[in-house]
């Protein structure tokens, strides 16, 4: 089975759904944000001390370490910002966009201090959301709307499209 890349805005459920797919399918689960944390330290600290550009470089490095098959990869919300990452995912796997409305994201994240790009004003957050949503839509092989759905029902929907 080709690697499944889960993309979507922060708070869309990529890590949760990735873990569930791992359990159901019995394949490896990797989380690119967690991979960065394990190698380089906390994301908020990287943003503060080294900047977003350096974080994105670390993220790309982690992405390139993901296998081509039998793996589900929960990506960071901004992985789509780099053309290099978009090309890599298209060439190496099947891309699932977990599509959550801005309202759902705002409810889930609240004022999460661990997400540097969520600490901005509402207008900036909405612009970021809209820009990335366009990239997710263009890139995805499958879009699954997650609003008002349990993680398990999202997994079932994904599996229904795969098998």
Image: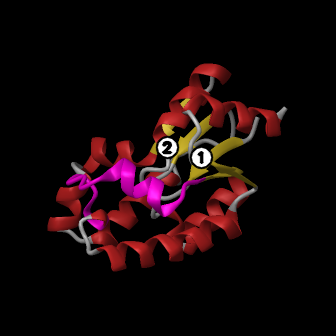
- Residue 13 belongs to the span the image colors magenta: no
**SS under mark 2:** loop
- Residue 107 belongs to the span the image colors magenta: yes
User: As drawn, is 150 to the left or to the right of 11?
Assistant: right
Q: Residue tagged by mark 2?
A: 13
The location of residue 50, given as percent across then percent down, is 20, 68
User: Label 1: how many residues lie within 10 Å, few (<14), some (14-19) or many (20+)?
Assistant: some
Range shown magenta? 99-117
Q: Decide: is 57 above or below 25.
A: below
Q: Nearer the viewer, residue 61 or 137?
A: 137
The location of residue 135, given as percent across then percent down, is 60, 71
Of discs 2 and 1, which sits in the foreground? 1
Q: Decide: is 116 above or below 51.
A: above
Whether residue 93 is visible to the viewer of this picture, yes or no, is: no
The tag earlier along the polypeptide, 2 or 1, is 2
What's the distance in space between the residues labelled 2 and 1, CA to CA?
8 Å
Pointers 2 and 1 in contact (CB under 8 A)?
Answer: yes
Q: Looking at the rendering, in which quadrant would you find the C terminus?
A: top right
**SS under mark 1:** loop
User: Label 2: how many residues lie within 10 Å, few (<14), some (14-19) or many (20+)?
Assistant: many
Q: Which numbered tag is attached to residue 146?
A: 1
């Amino acid at each position: 089975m080709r690697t499944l890349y889960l993309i979507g805005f922060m708070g869309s459920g990529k890590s949760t759904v990735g873990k569930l797919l791992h359990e159901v399918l019995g394949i490896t689960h990797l989380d690119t944000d967690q991979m960065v944390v394990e190698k380089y330290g906390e994301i908020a600290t990287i943003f503060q001390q080294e900047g977003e550009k350096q974080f994105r470089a670390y993220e790309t490095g982690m992405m390139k370490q993901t296998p081509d098959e039998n793996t589900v990869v929960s990506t960071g919300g901004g992985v789509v910002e780099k053309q290099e990452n978009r090309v890599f995912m298209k060439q190496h796997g099947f891309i699932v966009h977990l599509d959550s409305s801005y309202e759902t994201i705002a409810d889930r994240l609240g004022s999460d201090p661990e997400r540097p790009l969520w600490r901005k004003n509402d207008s900036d957050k909405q612009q970021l959301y809209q820009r990335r949503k366009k990239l997710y839509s263009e890139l995805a092989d499958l879009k699954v709307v997650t609003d008002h759905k349990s993680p398990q029902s999202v997994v079932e929907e994904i599996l229904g499209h795969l098998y």
